[in-house]
Image (tube, helix red, strand yellow):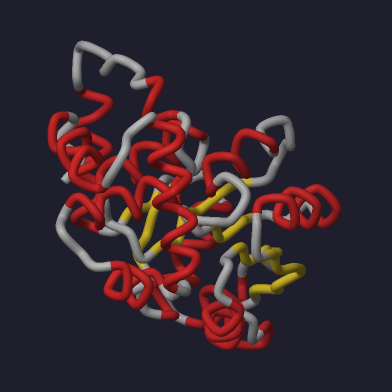
Amino acid sequence: MSANTNAERPQARVVLVDDHRMFRTGVRAEIGQTERTNVDVVGEAADVDQAVTVVTSTMPDVVLLDVHLPGGGGVEVLRRCASLEGVKFLALSVSDAAEDVIGVIRGGARGYVTKTITGTDLVDAIFRVRDGDAVFSPRLAGFVLDAFAATDTPPIDEDLDRLTQREREVLRLIARGYAYKEIAKQLYISVKTVESHVSAVLRKLQLSNRHELTRWATARRLV
């Protein structure tokens, strides 16, 4: 979609929700140039509580929502904003895990794109979601089609539901054999934060060590 076409459309008001400030700055630089894209970034948030407050106060057209956020993740933001009329959500995440995609779509998001998307394509996705379309990065669309085409709804895993989105991501990486330092580097968090997440996962699942955690995750095909 060309910049001229974007400029002819009514302005899209957007809120950015991501816990990495530098990433939000980069996205704002790409999409927040109103003269070129006709997109107005009206707010930012770094965690669930901030997101709910900003979205409620600004009532944007589209929320660019990271899946993994402090305070319960993107799914929690969707749950707490479910009653807001006219606000649409587009997941923008580094994760391309099927469970993350399906989780936010079931939570009410209108699309899911990964952070490898170009600025031009992201602007296009914002307008499409604002106008009522569903938008997915090509590979991710298959996850959604497979999930909703299934005749049997998967049983709810109450143990897994106790974990936040970030804890689930740490769980998967631990089960795949990553060291704490490797997980910290991949998720852009500190080793101490990784340790805290692992402790929380073990406590919630009533497991004793990472070996039991790996067996638990493998049995549920989370690895």
Percent coordinates x, y for residue 112 in the rendering: 39, 53
Percent coordinates x, y for residue 10 in the rendering: 68, 64
Q: Nearer the viewer, residue 6 or 40?
A: 40
Res 10 seen here: no
Percent coordinates x, y for residue 157 in the rendering: 34, 21
- On the image, which quarter does residue 34 sit in? bottom right
Q: Nearer the viewer, residue 179 or 156?
A: 179
Q: Residue at x 31, y 48 (%)?
A: 171
Q: Residue at x 52, y 35 (%)?
A: 108
Q: Nearer the viewer, residue 179 or 133?
A: 179
Quadrant where the N terminus sits is bottom left
Total labels: the figure holds 0
Q: Residue at x 67, y 63 (%)?
A: 15
- On the image, which quarter does residue 148 sit in? top left
Q: Nearer the viewer, residue 49 or 188?
A: 188
Residue found at the very far front of the displayed protein: 208
**Left or right of 191: which side holds 53?**
right
Compared to 204, does 51 lie above or below? below
Q: Residue at x 69, y 38 (%)?
A: 81
Percent coordinates x, y for residue 154 in the rendering: 26, 18
**Left or right of 33: which side holds 161?**
left
Compared to 34, does 216 lie above or below? above
- On the image, which quarter does residue 36 sit in? bottom right
